[in-house]
Image (cartoon, rainbow, N blue to C red):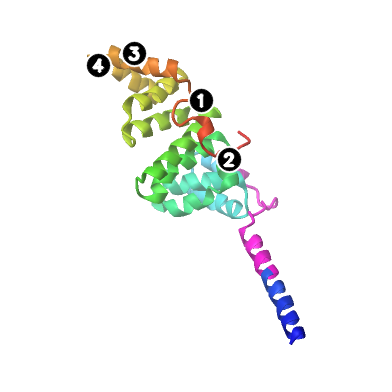
Amino acid sequence: MTRIFASMHVRMAYAAAALLFSTVLWSAPAVADPSIDAGPGVAAYEAGDYARAHDLLKPAAEAGDIQARYLMARLLSGDLADRTDYQQAFAYLDAKTRCFSVDALNFYANAMLRYHGEERYTILVEEIEIYKEAAGAGSIKALFNMGLTITKNMRKPVLGASYVYEAAEKGDPQGSQIIKRIKADHSGDIALARIRKLVREQPFEVRWPALTSFRRQCPAF
């Protein structure tokens, strides 16, 4: 009887080890295949030939090339209108891909609502936190997008406008247009005074959401 139990224990241990190995193997990120060159696909994308870029980038993206995965996510999110697929686009934005650059991280935040298809508070907060991280790493577009999202989706106009104001100060054209419209309003001086006061009293790092209040997507930034 003891031998039977010992044998069963060994078989169970082997089964558990095999299951663990399979889980780790399937969850491991793909390693890029250096034999597949993403260069022609990147060139086609930059030239605006999106249909050709799609066909050239897809094999490289599936082989693990990070830039190809990022550009495929963009193509499937509206750049190539007849092949829009938000689910597949979001799948391309794995941890390595969304940390490819601050632009990729900004795009990942931008894709979140379209992927989830609803405006849950927790999703909005996560999106804003990712914008904040990208903005803190130097993305002016993420700074603007964060301000717009806080204003429109969170309904916090002064807080949102403070980030739009900072984006405008850094040269973002959309941010500059909005600040010009605020200035042109009959109560624009009062509104701008409130925005500037918030920026002065609560610097970027500590203004909601504070950079220290959430887990970073890309610690290397």
Report which residue position mark 4 lands on. 185
Question: Against 73, is 129 above or below?
Answer: above
Q: Which residues are magenta?
A: 17-40
Q: Earlier in the sequence, mark 3 or mark 1?
A: 3
Judging depth in this view, the residue of 42 and 158 nearest the camera is 158
Which label lies toward us, 1 or 4? Answer: 1
Compute the Cα span from label 2 to label 3. 36 Å
Q: Quadrant of the N terminus?
A: bottom right
On residue 205, which mark appears? 1
First-in-chain label (2 vs 4): 2
Would you say residue 7 is visible in this rendering? yes
Q: Quadrant of the C terminus?
A: top right
Q: Earlier in the sequence, mark 4 or mark 3?
A: 4
Q: Amino acid at mark 3?
A: Ala
Q: Nearer the viewer, mark 4 or mark 3?
A: 3
Residue 107 % position (x, y)? 48, 39
